[in-house]
Amino acid sequence: MLLRTARSLTANPCDAEDLLQTALTKTYLAWERIQDHRALDGYVRKALLNTRTSQWRKRRVDEFVCDELPEPEPQQGPDPAEAQAVRDALWQAVLKLPARQRAMVVLRFYEDLSEVQTAAVLGVSVGTVKSAVSRALVKLREDRQLAADVRGGEATGLTSAREPATAAAA
């Protein structure tokens, strides 16, 4: 959860990891001054915010004005509209899953929890999470509407390594 907070404060995942590490270091150094260790989560979040603010202020001073802006490099990735259409189609397919599988898929891939964390949140075994997520992914791969939507925008990346992209076309 702290990494997610750090990612929301930065644009780069590597910067988020550095920010979190710096905030945790500051928390460690201030450990004896922290009176309520139960409120540690809030303390670390505040350290994240303060550290990011300090970095932002420092970086602003380091910026300089130039006469000409460089030409932007052409986008190499997929069209943002197509990518959004694929995300929407994927979400519609996830909504068709049974409630238990949907909950596990959302926790694992949208909330980015580990299998152990997902099992703890739902009060089930890790094996149950693994098998339910595996079955859910099979259902998503076999969803013809999702495959058509993904192929319609030519935005690939949702096909499995075990399943060739052309096999779903039949």
Image (cartoon, rainbow, N blue to C red):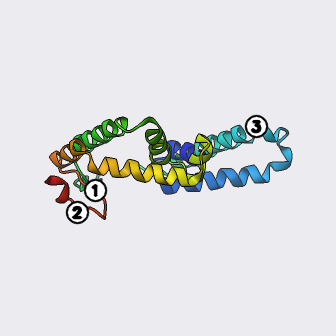
Residue type at mark 2 is Pro
Q: Quadrant of residue 25?
A: bottom right
Q: Could you tell me how far apart the alpha carbons at marks 3 and 1 are, in whole angstroms?
A: 43 Å
Q: Residues within 10 Å of mark 3 (few under 14, many from 20)?
A: few
Q: Tag 2 or tag 3, which sits nearer the N-term?
A: 3
Residue receiving disc 2: 164
Q: Position of residue 75 (x, y in %)?
A: 24, 53
Secondary-structure class at tag 2? loop
User: Mark number for residue 39?
Assistant: 3
Q: Counting residues from the N terminus, which is met first, the one under dot 1 or under dot 2?
A: 1
- The residue drawn where x is 21% and y is 59% is 165
Q: Residue at x 66, y 50 (%)?
A: 23
The N terminus lies in which quarter of the figure?
Answer: top right
What is the x, y in percent for residue 19? 59, 52
Identify which residue, 88 or 36, lies in the foreground: 88
Q: State which quadrant residue 94 falls in.
A: top left
Q: Which residue is mark 1?
A: 159
Q: Residue at x 19, y 54 (%)?
A: 168
Amino acid at pointer 3: Ala
Report if the CB atoms under discs 1 and 2 are less than 8 Å apart.
yes
Q: Percent from the top left, x then y, of residue 100?
A: 47, 39
Label 2 crowd (10 A; few <14 / some 14-19 / many >=20): few
Q: Earlier in the sequence, mark 3 or mark 1?
A: 3
Going 31% across and 36% down the picture, which residue do you hit? 92
The reply to whether residue 100 is in sight is yes
